[in-house]
Image (spheres, grey):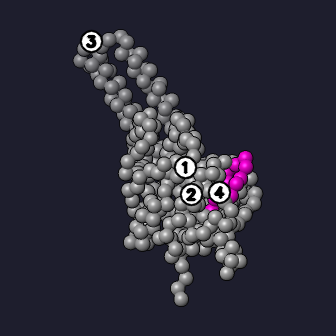
Amino acid sequence: MSHPSSLVIVTPVLNDWPSFAKLVEAIDAQSQLTEWTVTIVAVDDGSRQITLPEPSSLRGCVNEIRLVALNANQGHQRAIALGLAYVHENLRAERIVVMDSDGEDTPTAMLSLLNASAEKPGAIVVAQRAKRSESIVFKTFYTLYKSAFRMLTGKGMTFGNFALIPADRLPNLLFHSGIWNNFAATMLKSRLPIEFIPTFRGVRYEGKSSLGFTGLVVHGFSAISVYSDIVIGRIIALLVASSAVVFLAVLTILWMKLIIGSFVPGYATYVILFLVSMLSIALFTGFLMIITLLSTREKASDMPTQLLPLMIKRVETIRAQTLREAAS
């Protein structure tokens, strides 16, 4: 007799436990998941109060809910990293899905990720929004963020945290230092094969998104920081190219004034001195950036698995099997 495949769903939650309950209900109702042993890991990121679903509500395909309560708020990306670390250290899973609990990442889309994973078992499968439904302001700044990301890193960022990870690929992400800053950018930088599945944004279960302009900016910079070595290299190359242009401009003006005796405006000297001064400061700043980057590489950063015991306040488990066995 073959055993069901194991699926673990990791979702960070901060105060919005009514939405989490609706997500559990929606996943539990997916009949296509009956062939899976489904565990939902809810990473509590410092909620004021926690309300978990009753065990009696698990009547479908969800076998278990694990509450991993953190000692303090760590932020969305670090909560994901610690949730994945918990799965790696404590659970046996063939597939791990990371999704938000607010309803915008839907269980129906998760089934599409599972189907794609069956065809490409060695690849990470990410949900790529086929159409965005946010406000014009959000779309505008999101477009600017994607343009800045491509310009600074040379990569296109077209997806978020909603993804499926084969278990044997999890260490490639979990032991990458970028996992602390941005999960999606770490997947992109991991050089693992990635399959893109178009999905549509679901409707939020409760309230409105708390991600405002400031949050979007911080999220964008955290993604770019994963590529800090490439970004600094590109900035230095730009500074060197700019310095070469200014140097050639200085030589041209000197040649025009001293060799061929052409008229040169008096303010040209001040403009050149200003440009030389600004570029000197920029080059010095770039040099400091390189030194800082190299010095941080000498120190091995703590991985989520190392800090996990210190971060966890408690773990609570709700098992659907208990009630089923009691009823039989």
Is 91 drawn above or below residue 270 in the view shown?
below
Amino acid beneath label 1:
Tyr
Q: Which residue is label 1 attached to? A: 205
Circles 1 and 2, Cβ within 8 Å, touching? The answer is yes
Q: Helix, strand or loop at disc 2?
A: helix
Q: Helix, strand or loop at disc 1?
A: loop
Taking the magenta stretch, the answer to whether it contains residue 50 is yes
Estimate how packed mark 1 is, as few (under 14), some (14 to 19) or many (20 or more) residues with alpha carbons within 10 Å: some
218 or 212: nearer the viewer = 212
- Residue 23's disc is 2
Q: Which residue is label 4 attached to? A: 43
Q: Position of residue 59 (x, y in %)?
A: 60, 69
Task: Give the magenta range.
Answer: 41-52
Q: Helix, strand or loop at disc 4?
A: strand
Circles 3 and 1, Cβ within 8 Å, touching? The answer is no
Estimate how packed mark 2 is, as few (under 14), some (14 to 19) or many (20 or more) residues with alpha carbons within 10 Å: many
Q: Position of residue 304 (x, y in %)?
A: 64, 59
* Nearer-N-terminus badge (4/2): 2
